[in-house]
Every structure is written in C-alpha cells, then in structure tokens.
Amino acid sequence: MTRRVNRRDFVLTSAAGLAAAAATPRTLFGQGPTMMTPRSVKPIVVSSANGHRFKNGGTKTCVETAFEGIVRGDDVLDSLIAGVNIVELDPEDTSVGYGGLPNADGVVQLDSCCMHGPKKQAGGVACLEGVRTPSRVAKAVMEQTDHHLIVGKGAQDFARNMGFTIEADLNTDRSRQIWLEWKRRTDPEHYLDPRKREEVERKVMREMIEEGLVDENHLYGTINCDGISPKGEICGVTTTSGLAWKIPGRVGDSPILGAGLYVDGAVGAAGSTGRGEANLYNLCSFMIVEGMRRGLAPKDAGMEALRRIQANTVEKRLLNGRGLPNFGINFYVINARGEHAGVGMYSNDRLKFAVCDENGARLEPIEPLLPGNPED
Ligand code: GLY
C-alpha cells in the first residue's frame, strides 16, 4: 500500500535528499512537488537598504527587529511588519510612510501589501492617505476582509473603521520643502507643454539628486522586507510612498501581488524597489518565485526577471544612450532553504540591500544585470 506524503512534511535529512531536491524536474508553473521545505532552516531577513539604515530614534533597524522577532518565535509577518514600521514612522526616510515624498499635488499617498506564506493569505492598500503605517492596514485587509486590495478613499474609510488614526497630512517639513522646491523648478508658470514638461522634470530630478536634495534611491523609494523562520515559514511585506511627485492616484508595483511582492510558503519570496511600471508590466516577483519553483537559485531567478524587463523595455524614452533601460529596479529574494540574493538592473558602490541572519545585520552589494549607470 502506498502512502501519500505531504510535501510540507517531507524532511530533508541527508545530502542525498538535497541532491534529489535539486534534481526535481523543471516544469513551468508546475503543480507537482517542486521545492521541498526543510523543517529546520537558517532563518534570515532581507530588505532594501533602508531596512538597515533607519531606527526612528530607537536602537534597532528594520531587519534587526524582524530577525529578533522571528527567532523569538513571533509570527513571521508580524515580525516583518514591526520592522518596516520603523522605516514607515521615521521622518528621516522620505520614501515610505510618514514623511514619504508626496504626489504632484503635495499629498502623501501610500501603497503596501503583505503575504503570509503558511496561511496563504494576502492583503494590500493603495493610494491610502492619512495613515502612517500602510503595512498595518494591508495586514488588516488580509485578516479582516475577504479581499486582497482596497484603494483610495475606501482604504482610508476601512482604516478608520479598523481604529487607525487618520491624519490630515503625512508630510514632514522636510518632505514638504522638497516638494515645494520641485514645484518651483518644474512649474514656474503653471503650464508647460507636456513634452517640455517631461524634459524639465527629468532635468530637475537629475539636478535635485546631484545637489543632494533627493536620494536617487528614493524617487521610487520603497521598502520590501522578506523573512523565513527556523520552521521554514516565509512571509513578506512591501510598503512605499511610491514615485515622488507622481500624478495623484498613480499606483506602482508595491501593493500589487505578484509585482511588488510575491510569497509562496513552499518556495520562497521576492519583492521589489525601483521603477514600478517596469515591474507591473512583467510581474517579476511572481516570475522570480516561479523561477525558484523550477529550481533556479535566488540570484538566477532574479536575473531572469531583470532580463525579461530589459527585453520588454523598447520605448525610446525609457532607453539610455547605449539602448539599455534608463531606470533602476531591484529585487530582494529568499528561498525555502534560507538562501538569499539582492539583484538590480544596475548597481554601484552605494546600492546595497540589507540582510540579517545568525551573523548579524549588514548591507550587501546588489548584484547588477547591466554594467554602468542607468543614465549613461
Ligand atoms: N516601486 C515603487 C513604485 O514604483 O511605486
């Protein structure tokens, strides 16, 4: 008599077991057993670099807080959200939550989503105004509703009904001053013709980055944070104020399941920062997790997604002088073995991602697909 073995109960106990797992046939979007989840793995948390930079006046960064919670045995998603809350609440970070750079009208609009691997649940909010911690509202959508995404005024009404404090304005003096400077430079007479306006906006962006007014990584600034517990439980969260000075109502990749974040509790997690439109067109977080399901290592799965973005970037306005994408986009990836990668279309000495594991918290370099800089 044969006994059907539950995939999650299959414990890898030997090198032979690992070899067998590596030899699993590669199937596109395979339904069969693809990656076996060991019962005990090396816990790890990865995030974008802001996850190991800001402390909101406390003593720990996002990845340190999340890792501490995970090894203590707290729920993995709760731990990750406790981590990103530090960045959302820190007025010094202008890419996420309170003090995130506002839209073109000077209004901070926030997006977030989260996924719980073991529970197979997800939730998200987009275009949310007035709540400093959209990641917590995303979790409330996950836990308190039958839905995966609530947007705009509906998201704010939902948050109010869930007991969140709604504030009239999430700008800090800093984010407002930067927006005012952008407004002054791009809209001196209120109406420029659209082509001229796009040129002026690009030029102003470059100037403001060069002058140190805006962090180049914060134009599409976001935090994605993914983690796995010693029991192999995988979760992820992404939260953002989106593209700086976006058209009001614009939503990027961050709150969209499969784009800004994707988690499969048996395979791994991937999330993004950078140009959301490029990711929305290709649904790369989903693609990366599916790549790992076919047996790719986190780095290779990430590179495959970046190559897809490159292949689908053909509009001249999105290409640099070398005919390559003129924007940055990064992915943070973990698999069910606790292996990780941070990859990007481009990288440089300053472009890193955050990791916290048994060796402590640190920044590691983003591995680039393409040489040079987006603007070259
Ligand atoms: N990746 C963040 C955004 O495009 O809004």
Image (cartoon, rainbow, N blue to C red):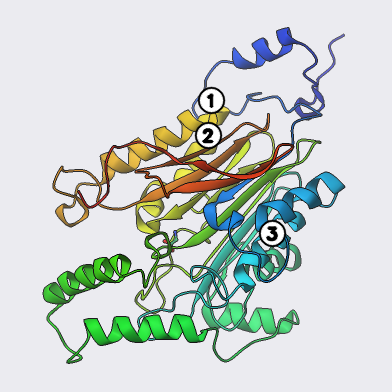
Asked if 359 appears above or below 214 in the picture, the reply is above
What amino acid type should be assigned to the residue bearing mark 1? Arg
Identify the residue position indicated by label 2 in the image.
290
**Displayed quadrant of residue 83:** bottom right
> What secondary structure is found at the residue carrying circle 1?
loop
For the point 45% across and 44% down, the residue is 284
**Residue 182 visible in the displayed image:** yes
Mark number displayed over residue 294:
1
- For residue 166, which quarter of the picture? bottom right
Label 3, residues with CA under 10 Å away: few <14, some 14-19, many ≥20:
many
Quadrant of the image for the N terminus?
A: top right
> How far, Cα to Cα, is label 2 from label 1?
6 Å
Give the residue number, with chain letter if any, for mark 3: 83
* Residue at point 37%, 82% (across, down): 179
Disc 2 and disc 1 in contact, CB within 8 angstroms: yes
Amino acid type, callout 2: Glu
Position in image of residue 91 (x %, y %): 57, 76
Q: Amino acid at mark 3?
A: Gly
Disc 1 beta carbon < 8 A from ligand 1?
A: no
Label drawn at residue 28? none
x then y, percent, for residue 88: 61, 69
Q: Is mark 3 within 8 Å of ligand 1?
A: no
